[in-house]
Amino acid sequence: MREIEFDVIVKAVKDMIMHCGTDLPQDTYDALEAAMEAEKSPVSKEVIRQILENANIAKDEKRPLCQDTGLAVFFVNVGEDVRIKGGLLRDAINQGTEEGYTEGYLRASTCEPFSRLNLKDTVGYNLPAIIHFDIVSGDKIDIEYAAKGGGSENVSRAKVFPPAAGKDGIVEYVKEVISDAGGNPCPPITVGVGIGGTFEKAVISSKHALFRDLETKHEDPEMAELEERILTEINNLGIGAMGMGGTKTALAVHIESNPCHIASLPVSVNVQCHSSRHTHITI
Amino acid sequence: MATYTLTTPLTSEDTKKLVAGDTVLLNGTIYTARDAAHKRLVDLIEAGEALPFDLEGSVIYFVGPTPPKPGDPIGSAGPTTSYRMDSYSPTMLKHGSKGMIGKGKRNEAVKDACVEYDGIYFGATGGAGALLGKQIRSAEVIAYPELGPEAVRKITVEDFPVTVVNDTKGNDIYQMGRSQYEVKS
């Protein structure tokens, strides 16, 4: 049984959070540059230029890319042959989150649902983190992290279709969600589509799909084709950067598909703003 | 599409010349408020009580900034999504406010109020918090400090870049832009 010190996890999480807060991942930067080149609307082109200039300022001056520094979302794969020495893994991730958000001058955006009071003085600074654990073979821990903003989360939706809806039904549904959202989720967006599983499996899959690097295609050619089809349909909506009208509404569509019940076709659409702040580390 | 440089407080003369799609560089004092602060401000207006700042000609920025680093007046400060303020904005405009800065579409009641009270809804680039925060020269919490990032701040801006989304004639750049680039299947 391999042992990993509690503090090693804390530091790794803190470093990921502080880095993501100010440094736009290269895959996102590259996708935005390509979108700026391809964009036909001069207004949307200028918006993307501002987004890239913002990324340069944030990186050079270590300022947060966006004032919405998100809720901290983690997917953690824990090897069966590893244990944490000196505390619980969940506590280490939460402690790293609090330290990263505090020392990085990132905003604490977590609040109580009804009083709307910030939980920084009671639960902790931007705590609790949202953590999805899974158990895998091996003696390593893989931690994927993303800072998830509110504007794009607010337009996300899920629905369980009858099986007859098929691919056409899914395409229409994603189009409807993105069309209704317009400029609200800060396009050019990335769209995570979770298909199959149960209701909650589809939702979690749509979230996890957003963690994939933007330039990657789905390994299953059929799903890769569906991703491409949905991307084209979304860009035909004409929403453009920040809703100003244009040809590049989405940078990528990522699908995660799962086996599902013979009676159901669950679909979830999770939207990510242009500031796709995500990274991962294996310890 | 023209570019204007304007200084707050704004007058009807300022706002009526603006057309959806115009670029404006804003200067002077503006006030920050999000959902929770708007609720309190509108409650005060409806109760006939005094507000923490003068609404006449004011521009309200929908923003909850990050904490400032030592030596900076404010942290990153880009716009938040505006529809959450739709139920409050017509009251603010009716009582003298002339402008709002946010991102994303507004409802018909807000657009109608812009026409009736010579108000402008400006869009700033969402997610450009570092760039926009640099155009803020000073910041001071003037009300509701317990709301943290949602407190009302009096901020001074210099050449703060915004685009006219909804003008005093009822135009909407989001609808105009989208219809121009939509590909019908």
Image (cartoon, coloured by chain):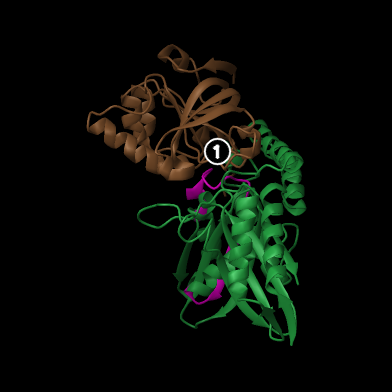
Chain colours: A green, B brown
Q: Residue at x 37, y 38 (%)?
A: B38
Disc 1 marks which residue?
B178
Which residue occupies the extreme left position in the image? Answer: B47
Please give left or right for residue A202 compared with residue B35 in the image: right
Q: Residue at x 53, y 56 (%)?
A: A126
x and y percentages locating residue B177 in the rendered image: 56, 34
x and y percentages locating residue A205 in the rendered image: 58, 70
Q: Is residue B14 above or below residue A280?
A: above
Q: Indicate whether residue A194 is drawn in magenta.
A: yes
User: Is residue A194 in view from this perspective?
Assistant: no
Q: Indicate whether residue A233 is drawn in magenta.
A: no
Q: Which residues are magenta?
A: A177-199
Q: Quadrant of residue A195?
A: bottom right
Q: Is residue A180 above or below residue A210?
A: above
- The one nearer the camera, A245 or A273, is A273
Q: Amino acid at mark 1?
A: Arg
Rate crowding at label 1 as few (under 14), some (14 to 19) or many (20 or more) other CA atoms within 10 Å: many
